[in-house]
Image (cartoon, rainbow, N blue to C red):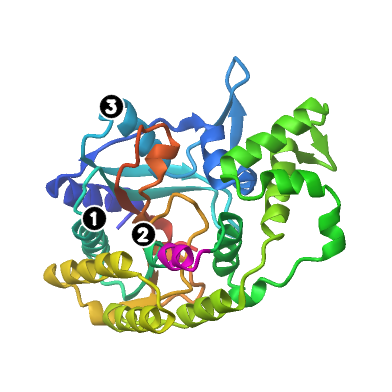
Amino acid sequence: MTETEAIFALIALFEREGYARTEPPVLQPADVFIDLSGEDIRRRMFVTQDAAGAELCLRPEYTIPVCLQHLGDRGHEPSGYSYGGPVFRMRPNESGEFLQAGLESIGRTDIPAADAEILGLALEGLESLGGLSYRVKLGDMGLLNGLIDALGIAPAAKRRVIRAIVSGQGIAGLSEPDGASQQEHAGLLAAIEGQAPQAAKAFVEDILSIAGIARVGGRSAGEIAERFLARAANRTGLPDRARDVLERYLAISGNPDQAAEAVKALARDAGLDLTAAVTVFEERTGFMAARGLDVSAFSFAATFARNLDYYTGFIFEVQNSSRDDGKPIVGGGRYDGLLEHLGARAPIPAVGCSFWLDRILGRP
């Protein structure tokens, strides 16, 4: 099966399930991706300009373009979308132009059922492409965020904790910052500490603009702002109790039922109320089982997280059992914060997934 044939097969499946095909423009506003994903994405995008000098990029993924299109066409009205086509992103040892397919469910309020449906369709779509052996890895940003909030960890430290988890360092990576390095620019760091990332970044960029600074050492104003944000986050440490509870949470793994019991035991022992997040987690597992999915074969890992503010709940990856590089062949999750970042009047529930067709069909 070719990648094009795979796209047609997946789209046919998704359309039968009510996910209408959409095809956002290949040229997209670059600033949207940079604002939401940080300056690091700039180094992986293919960037150009229009006649007026506005910065554009070749579509690096589908989720943000589909959400922008949804806001323009449907607003808060629930809709389901499927897609398939080229995306453009620099990847080490892989092609910078590759085909992706996927689906997005936007606006549904039955969150656990929608999560289970997306995973179920992802696995059904994968199986329709051939007898591939795979393993399913689950995570939950709702559990992690709920735990951090219940511990009373400040926003700046919360971002630092999540970055450490995503990087694979864990709580051990939260070493105390060097005092001398924090004295320099202490006033600016204090001014942005605790601010929302976008507001803090805009503040730093304004300061640099007022000072007439465009680039320093090859770094743009945006990149400099990102470094200040990281340094501001490093000013905040973790109390011993919070560190101990987080370390115990990050040790949790197993199938979803085992993980839920471990999280409930942790909450009881630590005197924390995680009822809302655990309830969604268990309801989702129930809907997965009701769809005929073998949840006992799925692997939950508390260390599995994503370092983007708009991921708010369920996340998953499907990996090819015969590949040893750990790269996902399907990945997705819940991103209830994204559409508000893109201009919606209020948060809009949303969940989706994407297929890396080159990896599925055997290309390196």
Q: Residue furthest front?
A: 271
Q: CA distance from mark 2 to mark 1?
A: 9 Å
Q: Which residue is mark 2?
A: 313
Q: Position of residue 111 (x, y in %)?
A: 23, 55
**Mark 1 vs 3, N-terminal side:** 3
* Count of numbered badges drawn on the protein: 3
Q: Can the viewer see residue 55?
A: yes
Does dot 3 land on a helix, a strand or a loop?
helix
In the rendering, at what x and y percent does residue 203 appear?
67, 35
Badges 2 and 1: C-beta atoms under 8 Å apart?
A: yes
Residue where numbered disc 3 is placed: 73
Measure the alpha-carbon separation of dots 1 and 3: 22 Å
Residue 161 relative to residue 138: left or right: right
Residue at the spot 55% in from the left edge and 81% down from the top edge: 244
Q: Amino acid at mark 1?
A: Ile
The magenta stretch spans which residues? Answer: 144-152
User: Who is closer to the viewer here, 313 or 128?
Assistant: 313
- Residue 117 location in percent, x, y? 20, 59
Seen from the viewer's position, the closer of residues 181 and 27 is 181
Position of residue 243 in the picture relative to residue 258 (left or right)? right
Quarter location, residue 107: top left
Q: Which residue is mark 1?
A: 111
At 35% from the left edge and 70% from the top edge, which residue is drawn?
274
**Rendering coords of residue 208 (x, y %):** 77, 33
Residue closest to the far top: 52
241 vs 51: above or below: below
Q: Residues within 10 Å of mark 1 (few under 14, many from 20)?
A: many
Q: Is residue 223 magenta?
A: no
Return the residue nearer the eye: 255 or 332.
Answer: 255
Q: Secondary structure at mark 1?
A: helix
Specify few, some or many for label 3: CA neighbours under 10 Å numbering under 14, 14-19, or 20 or more.
Answer: few
